[in-house]
Image: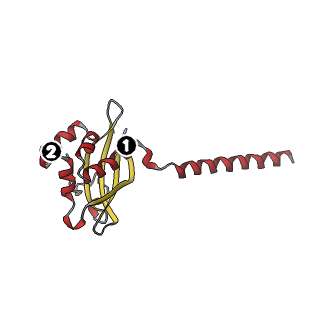
């Protein structure tokens, strides 16, 4: 009888612990990782034309590439230029998913636009690395295309994904 009671107590304790883990996972959104926030924050800032907020989120090398390749040296001129006019303006960009790349992250962001683009979203890819001062910075991006487009698959390594920077 004592062995049976001990077994029940052990099972109850394990069930409670499993329940606590599930609750913790359910209430801790993945976008709380600061690297993920950098990607979504950049997509929103550049997509809304806020270069002052977008530029500090970039690595020095990417900032230089933007200075050389984007109109006026502004990230928003590249990002906003990727969207065709029929999409309208960016409404919102949010974290979609991420895969670790060593100590860095390959992050996808999904965005909605005001004119019928957003039911399946507009997908963007960002490679985000932690720099020496502990901040997370974007060092490359790609995509900014409709998520239904086959070129939006595996954007980190897909050579057909457009809008690569640098």
Left or right: 134, with 10 as reference point: left
Say which quarter of the image contains residue 120: bottom left
Q: Which mark is residue 165?
A: none
Q: Nearer the viewer, mark 1 or mark 2?
A: 2
The residue that disc 2 covers is: 73
- Asked if residue 5 shows in the view, the reply is yes
Q: What residue is shown at x 73% (from left), y 49% (from top)?
A: 12
The residue that disc 1 covers is: 35
Q: Position of residue 37 (x, y in %)?
A: 37, 46
Display coloring:
secondary structure
Q: What residue is shown at x 45% (from left), y 49% (from top)?
A: 30
Judged from this view, the residue extending furthest toward the right is 1
Say which quarter of the image contains residue 96: bottom left
Q: Position of residue 8 (x, y in %)?
A: 77, 50
Q: What residue is shown at x 30% (from left), y 69% (from top)?
A: 116
Q: Position of residue 19 (x, y in %)?
A: 63, 51
Left or right: 5, with 49 as reference point: right
């Amino acid at each position: 009888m004592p062995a049976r009671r001990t077994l029940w107590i052990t099972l109850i304790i394990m069930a409670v612990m499993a329940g606590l883990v599930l609750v913790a996972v359910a209430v801790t959104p993945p976008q709380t990782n600061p690297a993920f926030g950098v990607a979504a924050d950049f997509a929103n800032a550049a997509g809304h034309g806020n270069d002052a907020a977008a530029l500090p989120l970039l690595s020095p090398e990417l900032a230089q590439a933007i200075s050389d390749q984007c109109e006026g040296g502004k990230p928003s001129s590249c990002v906003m230029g990727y969207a065709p006019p029929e999409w309208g303006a960016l409404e919102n960009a949010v974290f979609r998913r991420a895969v670790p790349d060593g100590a860095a992250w390959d992050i996808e962001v999904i965005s909605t636009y005001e004119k019928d683009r957003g039911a399946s979203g507009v997908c963007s890819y960002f490679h985000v690395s932690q720099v020496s001062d502990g901040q997370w910075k974007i060092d490359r991006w790609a995509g900014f295309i409709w998520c239904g487009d086959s070129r939006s698959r595996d954007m980190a390594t897909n050579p057909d994904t457009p809008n690569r920077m640098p």
